[in-house]
Image (cartoon, rainbow, N blue to C red):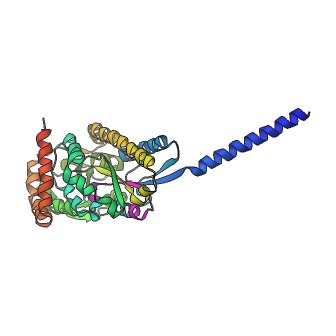
Protein backbone atom coordinates (compact mmCIF):
# COMPACT_ATOMS: atom_id res chain seq x y z
CA UNK A 1 0.00 0.00 0.00
CA UNK A 2 2.85 2.36 0.92
CA UNK A 3 4.62 1.56 -2.35
CA UNK A 4 1.45 2.30 -4.36
CA UNK A 5 1.00 5.67 -2.59
CA UNK A 6 4.63 6.58 -3.28
CA UNK A 7 4.21 5.65 -6.97
CA UNK A 8 1.12 7.87 -7.18
CA UNK A 9 2.98 10.77 -5.64
CA UNK A 10 5.88 10.36 -8.05
CA UNK A 11 3.47 10.24 -10.99
CA UNK A 12 1.82 13.45 -9.86
CA UNK A 13 5.16 15.17 -9.41
CA UNK A 14 6.26 14.02 -12.90
CA UNK A 15 3.01 15.21 -14.48
CA UNK A 16 3.22 18.61 -12.77
CA UNK A 17 6.85 19.00 -13.83
CA UNK A 18 5.97 18.14 -17.42
CA UNK A 19 3.08 20.61 -17.41
CA UNK A 20 5.27 23.35 -15.97
CA UNK A 21 7.95 22.59 -18.55
CA UNK A 22 5.39 22.79 -21.37
CA UNK A 23 4.00 26.07 -20.01
CA UNK A 24 7.50 27.52 -19.78
CA UNK A 25 8.27 26.46 -23.36
CA UNK A 26 5.01 27.95 -24.58
CA UNK A 27 5.72 31.15 -22.68
CA UNK A 28 9.20 31.35 -24.18
CA UNK A 29 7.86 31.25 -27.74
CA UNK A 30 7.79 34.71 -29.33
CA UNK A 31 4.95 35.48 -31.75
CA UNK A 32 5.86 37.70 -34.71
CA UNK A 33 3.19 39.57 -36.69
CA UNK A 34 3.11 39.48 -40.50
CA UNK A 35 0.67 41.82 -42.28
CA UNK A 36 -0.28 41.81 -45.97
CA UNK A 37 -3.22 42.96 -48.09
CA UNK A 38 -3.82 39.97 -50.36
CA UNK A 39 -6.53 37.36 -49.85
CA UNK A 40 -5.87 34.07 -48.01
CA UNK A 41 -5.99 32.15 -51.31
CA UNK A 42 -3.26 34.25 -52.91
CA UNK A 43 0.36 33.25 -53.44
CA UNK A 44 1.73 35.85 -51.03
CA UNK A 45 -0.37 34.39 -48.21
CA UNK A 46 0.89 30.89 -49.00
CA UNK A 47 4.45 32.21 -49.10
CA UNK A 48 3.90 33.90 -45.73
CA UNK A 49 2.67 30.63 -44.23
CA UNK A 50 5.70 28.81 -45.63
CA UNK A 51 7.94 31.56 -44.23
CA UNK A 52 6.36 31.03 -40.83
CA UNK A 53 6.91 27.28 -40.93
CA UNK A 54 10.56 27.77 -41.77
CA UNK A 55 11.08 30.39 -39.06
CA UNK A 56 9.64 27.99 -36.51
CA UNK A 57 11.83 25.19 -37.85
CA UNK A 58 15.07 27.17 -38.02
CA UNK A 59 14.62 28.74 -34.56
CA UNK A 60 13.66 25.41 -32.95
CA UNK A 61 10.19 26.71 -32.18
CA UNK A 62 11.30 29.80 -30.28
CA UNK A 63 9.58 32.05 -32.82
CA UNK A 64 6.13 31.65 -34.34
CA UNK A 65 4.65 33.72 -37.17
CA UNK A 66 1.07 34.98 -37.04
CA UNK A 67 -0.10 36.00 -40.52
CA UNK A 68 -2.82 38.65 -40.95
CA UNK A 69 -4.08 38.74 -44.58
CA UNK A 70 -6.49 41.02 -46.46
CA UNK A 71 -5.43 44.22 -44.69
CA UNK A 72 -6.73 43.06 -41.30
CA UNK A 73 -4.05 45.07 -39.52
CA UNK A 74 -3.27 47.77 -42.08
CA UNK A 75 -3.24 48.68 -45.75
CA UNK A 76 0.15 48.70 -47.50
CA UNK A 77 1.28 52.26 -46.59
CA UNK A 78 0.11 51.86 -42.98
CA UNK A 79 1.81 48.46 -42.69
CA UNK A 80 5.14 50.04 -43.60
CA UNK A 81 4.54 52.76 -41.03
CA UNK A 82 3.77 50.04 -38.47
CA UNK A 83 7.08 48.38 -39.35
CA UNK A 84 8.87 51.59 -38.50
CA UNK A 85 7.07 51.85 -35.17
CA UNK A 86 7.54 48.18 -34.33
CA UNK A 87 3.79 47.54 -34.27
CA UNK A 88 4.22 44.67 -36.73
CA UNK A 89 7.28 42.62 -37.55
CA UNK A 90 7.00 41.80 -41.28
CA UNK A 91 5.17 42.88 -44.40
CA UNK A 92 5.38 42.40 -48.18
CA UNK A 93 4.40 45.08 -50.64
CA UNK A 94 5.20 46.35 -54.10
CA UNK A 95 8.64 47.96 -54.19
CA UNK A 96 6.99 51.25 -55.06
CA UNK A 97 5.07 51.23 -51.77
CA UNK A 98 8.34 51.73 -49.93
CA UNK A 99 9.13 54.80 -52.03
CA UNK A 100 7.32 57.07 -49.57
CA UNK A 101 10.31 56.49 -47.30
CA UNK A 102 13.00 55.80 -49.93
CA UNK A 103 12.17 58.09 -52.86
CA UNK A 104 14.60 56.44 -55.28
CA UNK A 105 12.51 53.26 -55.24
CA UNK A 106 9.90 55.12 -57.32
CA UNK A 107 12.18 54.28 -60.24
CA UNK A 108 11.55 50.54 -59.88
CA UNK A 109 8.08 51.36 -61.18
CA UNK A 110 9.38 52.74 -64.47
CA UNK A 111 7.33 51.05 -67.20
CA UNK A 112 8.74 48.25 -69.33
CA UNK A 113 12.13 47.97 -67.60
CA UNK A 114 12.20 44.18 -68.12
CA UNK A 115 10.33 41.78 -70.36
CA UNK A 116 10.22 38.47 -68.49
CA UNK A 117 10.61 36.97 -65.03
CA UNK A 118 14.20 35.89 -65.46
CA UNK A 119 15.25 39.44 -66.35
CA UNK A 120 13.33 40.78 -63.38
CA UNK A 121 14.96 38.34 -60.96
CA UNK A 122 18.42 39.22 -62.23
CA UNK A 123 17.68 42.94 -61.93
CA UNK A 124 16.53 42.64 -58.32
CA UNK A 125 19.30 40.25 -57.32
CA UNK A 126 22.23 41.94 -59.05
CA UNK A 127 21.53 45.62 -59.74
CA UNK A 128 24.11 47.59 -57.77
CA UNK A 129 21.93 50.67 -57.90
CA UNK A 130 18.93 48.80 -56.46
CA UNK A 131 21.00 47.10 -53.75
CA UNK A 132 22.28 50.53 -52.80
CA UNK A 133 18.72 51.80 -52.39
CA UNK A 134 17.73 48.78 -50.30
CA UNK A 135 20.76 49.38 -48.05
CA UNK A 136 19.29 52.75 -47.02
CA UNK A 137 16.20 51.14 -45.46
CA UNK A 138 17.45 50.34 -41.91
CA UNK A 139 17.92 54.06 -41.27
CA UNK A 140 14.22 54.44 -42.14
CA UNK A 141 13.07 51.79 -39.66
CA UNK A 142 12.82 48.63 -41.77
CA UNK A 143 15.09 46.21 -43.59
CA UNK A 144 14.77 44.29 -46.87
CA UNK A 145 15.19 40.52 -46.44
CA UNK A 146 14.30 38.98 -49.81
CA UNK A 147 12.35 39.71 -52.99
CA UNK A 148 9.12 37.76 -53.17
CA UNK A 149 7.26 37.59 -56.46
CA UNK A 150 3.94 39.09 -57.53
CA UNK A 151 4.39 39.36 -61.28
CA UNK A 152 3.85 41.88 -64.04
CA UNK A 153 1.06 44.38 -63.62
CA UNK A 154 -1.91 44.13 -66.00
CA UNK A 155 -5.29 45.83 -66.39
CA UNK A 156 -8.80 44.68 -65.51
CA UNK A 157 -11.46 47.07 -66.79
CA UNK A 158 -15.19 47.08 -67.35
CA UNK A 159 -14.73 48.09 -70.99
CA UNK A 160 -12.26 46.57 -73.44
CA UNK A 161 -8.79 48.16 -73.57
CA UNK A 162 -7.33 47.43 -76.99
CA UNK A 163 -4.94 50.41 -76.96
CA UNK A 164 -4.07 53.50 -74.90
CA UNK A 165 -6.74 55.38 -76.84
CA UNK A 166 -9.38 53.39 -74.94
CA UNK A 167 -7.88 54.53 -71.62
CA UNK A 168 -8.89 58.15 -72.05
CA UNK A 169 -11.47 59.15 -69.46
CA UNK A 170 -11.37 55.81 -67.61
CA UNK A 171 -10.97 56.13 -63.85
CA UNK A 172 -8.46 53.46 -62.83
CA UNK A 173 -7.54 52.40 -59.31
CA UNK A 174 -3.90 52.04 -58.36
CA UNK A 175 -1.80 52.27 -55.20
CA UNK A 176 -0.10 55.47 -54.01
CA UNK A 177 3.08 55.73 -56.06
CA UNK A 178 4.36 58.73 -58.01
CA UNK A 179 5.86 56.77 -60.90
CA UNK A 180 2.77 54.62 -61.33
CA UNK A 181 0.59 57.72 -61.42
CA UNK A 182 2.79 59.28 -64.12
CA UNK A 183 2.68 56.07 -66.15
CA UNK A 184 -1.09 55.63 -66.00
CA UNK A 185 -1.78 59.29 -66.69
CA UNK A 186 0.57 59.10 -69.69
CA UNK A 187 -1.57 56.25 -71.01
CA UNK A 188 -4.66 58.43 -70.62
CA UNK A 189 -6.23 57.11 -67.43
CA UNK A 190 -7.66 59.21 -64.62
CA UNK A 191 -5.97 57.81 -61.51
CA UNK A 192 -7.83 56.89 -58.33
CA UNK A 193 -5.91 55.85 -55.18
CA UNK A 194 -7.55 53.44 -52.73
CA UNK A 195 -6.61 50.50 -50.49
CA UNK A 196 -6.66 47.09 -52.16
CA UNK A 197 -9.43 45.56 -49.99
CA UNK A 198 -11.82 48.32 -51.15
CA UNK A 199 -11.27 47.87 -54.87
CA UNK A 200 -13.76 45.08 -55.70
CA UNK A 201 -16.72 47.02 -54.27
CA UNK A 202 -15.53 50.28 -55.85
CA UNK A 203 -15.54 48.69 -59.31
CA UNK A 204 -18.86 46.96 -58.64
CA UNK A 205 -20.49 50.23 -57.61
CA UNK A 206 -18.97 52.19 -60.51
CA UNK A 207 -16.68 54.41 -58.45
CA UNK A 208 -13.84 53.30 -60.75
CA UNK A 209 -13.83 51.64 -64.15
CA UNK A 210 -11.08 49.15 -63.35
CA UNK A 211 -7.75 48.55 -61.67
CA UNK A 212 -4.21 47.34 -62.39
CA UNK A 213 -2.36 44.55 -60.59
CA UNK A 214 -0.43 41.34 -61.25
CA UNK A 215 -2.36 38.26 -62.39
CA UNK A 216 -2.20 36.46 -59.04
CA UNK A 217 -3.65 39.51 -57.26
CA UNK A 218 -6.38 39.86 -59.90
CA UNK A 219 -7.19 36.17 -59.52
CA UNK A 220 -7.18 35.94 -55.71
CA UNK A 221 -9.26 39.13 -55.32
CA UNK A 222 -11.63 38.08 -58.15
CA UNK A 223 -11.43 41.49 -59.82
CA UNK A 224 -12.29 39.81 -63.14
CA UNK A 225 -15.84 39.28 -61.82
CA UNK A 226 -16.58 43.02 -61.77
CA UNK A 227 -14.08 44.14 -64.45
CA UNK A 228 -14.08 41.20 -66.90
CA UNK A 229 -11.71 42.66 -69.51
CA UNK A 230 -8.26 41.43 -68.50
CA UNK A 231 -5.64 43.17 -70.67
CA UNK A 232 -2.07 41.89 -70.45
CA UNK A 233 -0.23 45.18 -70.72
CA UNK A 234 2.69 44.00 -68.52
CA UNK A 235 3.39 47.68 -67.98
CA UNK A 236 5.42 47.30 -64.77
CA UNK A 237 7.39 44.41 -63.28
CA UNK A 238 6.16 44.44 -59.69
CA UNK A 239 7.67 42.00 -57.18
CA UNK A 240 6.92 42.37 -53.46
CA UNK A 241 10.03 42.63 -51.29
CA UNK A 242 9.72 41.19 -47.79
CA UNK A 243 10.73 43.59 -45.04
CA UNK A 244 11.27 43.30 -41.30
CA UNK A 245 10.93 46.04 -38.71
CA UNK A 246 14.37 47.31 -37.75
CA UNK A 247 13.22 47.28 -34.11
CA UNK A 248 12.51 43.54 -34.46
CA UNK A 249 15.79 42.92 -36.26
CA UNK A 250 17.79 44.55 -33.48
CA UNK A 251 16.18 42.25 -30.91
CA UNK A 252 17.30 39.10 -32.76
CA UNK A 253 20.51 37.25 -32.00
CA UNK A 254 23.00 36.71 -34.83
CA UNK A 255 21.81 33.10 -35.14
CA UNK A 256 18.15 34.13 -35.29
CA UNK A 257 18.91 36.80 -37.89
CA UNK A 258 20.53 34.11 -40.03
CA UNK A 259 17.54 31.81 -39.49
CA UNK A 260 15.00 34.48 -40.45
CA UNK A 261 17.02 35.49 -43.52
CA UNK A 262 17.32 31.88 -44.64
CA UNK A 263 13.57 31.37 -44.21
CA UNK A 264 12.87 34.58 -46.15
CA UNK A 265 15.08 33.58 -49.07
CA UNK A 266 13.65 30.06 -49.29
CA UNK A 267 10.11 31.44 -49.26
CA UNK A 268 11.17 33.90 -51.98
CA UNK A 269 12.39 31.06 -54.22
CA UNK A 270 9.07 29.28 -53.74
CA UNK A 271 7.17 32.51 -54.44
CA UNK A 272 9.02 33.14 -57.71
CA UNK A 273 8.35 29.67 -59.02
CA UNK A 274 4.71 29.72 -57.89
CA UNK A 275 3.84 33.01 -59.58
CA UNK A 276 5.63 32.26 -62.83
CA UNK A 277 4.08 28.80 -63.17
CA UNK A 278 0.57 29.95 -62.22
CA UNK A 279 -0.01 32.84 -64.63
CA UNK A 280 -1.42 30.84 -67.55
CA UNK A 281 -3.45 28.51 -65.32
CA UNK A 282 -5.07 31.45 -63.54
CA UNK A 283 -5.82 33.21 -66.84
CA UNK A 284 -7.48 30.02 -68.11
CA UNK A 285 -9.59 29.76 -64.95
CA UNK A 286 -10.64 33.40 -65.25
CA UNK A 287 -11.57 32.84 -68.89
CA UNK A 288 -13.67 29.82 -67.92
CA UNK A 289 -15.54 32.05 -65.46
CA UNK A 290 -16.37 34.69 -68.06
CA UNK A 291 -13.31 36.94 -68.21
CA UNK A 292 -12.09 38.15 -71.60
CA UNK A 293 -8.30 37.98 -71.72
CA UNK A 294 -6.63 40.23 -74.32
CA UNK A 295 -2.96 40.24 -75.35
CA UNK A 296 -2.63 43.57 -77.19
CA UNK A 297 0.33 44.83 -79.17
CA UNK A 298 2.53 46.52 -76.58
CA UNK A 299 4.25 49.00 -78.89
CA UNK A 300 1.47 51.64 -78.55
CA UNK A 301 1.56 51.29 -74.77
CA UNK A 302 5.35 51.63 -74.69
CA UNK A 303 5.08 54.74 -76.84
CA UNK A 304 2.38 56.27 -74.65
CA UNK A 305 4.47 56.18 -71.46
CA UNK A 306 7.41 58.23 -72.78
CA UNK A 307 6.20 61.34 -70.89
CA UNK A 308 6.54 59.39 -67.65
CA UNK A 309 10.21 58.74 -68.44
CA UNK A 310 10.72 62.45 -69.12
CA UNK A 311 9.22 63.38 -65.74
CA UNK A 312 11.39 60.78 -63.99
CA UNK A 313 14.53 62.10 -65.67
CA UNK A 314 13.67 65.65 -64.72
CA UNK A 315 13.19 64.76 -61.05
CA UNK A 316 15.69 61.93 -60.43
CA UNK A 317 18.48 62.73 -62.90
CA UNK A 318 21.44 60.33 -62.77
CA UNK A 319 19.50 57.70 -60.80
CA UNK A 320 17.34 57.15 -63.88
CA UNK A 321 20.44 56.53 -65.97
CA UNK A 322 21.75 54.09 -63.34
CA UNK A 323 18.67 51.87 -63.20
CA UNK A 324 18.19 52.02 -66.97
CA UNK A 325 21.78 50.87 -67.46
CA UNK A 326 21.27 47.94 -65.07
CA UNK A 327 18.00 47.01 -66.79
CA UNK A 328 19.61 47.16 -70.22
CA UNK A 329 22.40 44.88 -68.98
CA UNK A 330 19.98 42.20 -67.79
CA UNK A 331 17.96 42.40 -71.01
CA UNK A 332 21.15 41.76 -72.99
CA UNK A 333 22.24 38.97 -70.65
CA UNK A 334 18.85 37.22 -70.86
CA UNK A 335 17.34 38.05 -74.25
CA UNK A 336 13.69 37.24 -74.90
CA UNK A 337 13.39 34.13 -77.05
In which quadrant will I find the C terminus?
Answer: top left
Total numbered labels placed on residues in the image: 0
> Furthest residue to the right?
1
84 falls in the magenta region:
yes
Q: Is residue 218 left or right of residue 45?
A: left
Q: Quadrant of residue 122?
A: top left
What segment carries the magenta color?
82-97
> Furthest residue to the front?
254
Q: Residue 220 location, x and y as percent?
A: 35, 47
Q: Residue 150 location, x and y as percent?
A: 29, 47
Residue at 55 percent across and 49 percent down: it is 29
Relative to 119, does residue 195 appear above or below in the rendering? below
162 falls in the magenta region:
no
**Depth order, front residue of 204/299:** 299
Residue at 23 percent across and 58 percent down: it is 105
Q: Is residue 187 visible?
A: no
Q: Residue 96 location, x and y as percent?
A: 26, 58
Residue at 71 percent across and 44 percent down: it is 17
Q: Is residue 35 left or right of residue 103?
A: right
Q: Is residue 178 visible?
A: yes
**Depth order, front residue of 255/199:** 255
> Furthest residue to the bottom?
315
In which quadrant will I find the N terminus?
Answer: top right
Q: Residue 101 location, x and y as percent?
A: 29, 64
**Depth order, front residue of 210/44:** 44
Q: Is residue 103 left or right of residue 56?
A: left
Amino acid sequence: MQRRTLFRQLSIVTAVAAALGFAAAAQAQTVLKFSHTDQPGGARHKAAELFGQKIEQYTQGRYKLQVYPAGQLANDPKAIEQLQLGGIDFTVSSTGSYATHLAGLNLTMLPYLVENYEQGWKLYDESKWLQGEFAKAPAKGFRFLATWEAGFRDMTTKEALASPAAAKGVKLRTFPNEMMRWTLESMGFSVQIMPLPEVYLAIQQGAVGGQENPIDTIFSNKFYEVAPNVTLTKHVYSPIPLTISEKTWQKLSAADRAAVTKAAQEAAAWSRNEIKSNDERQLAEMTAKGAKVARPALAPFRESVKPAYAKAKEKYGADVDAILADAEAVRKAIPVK
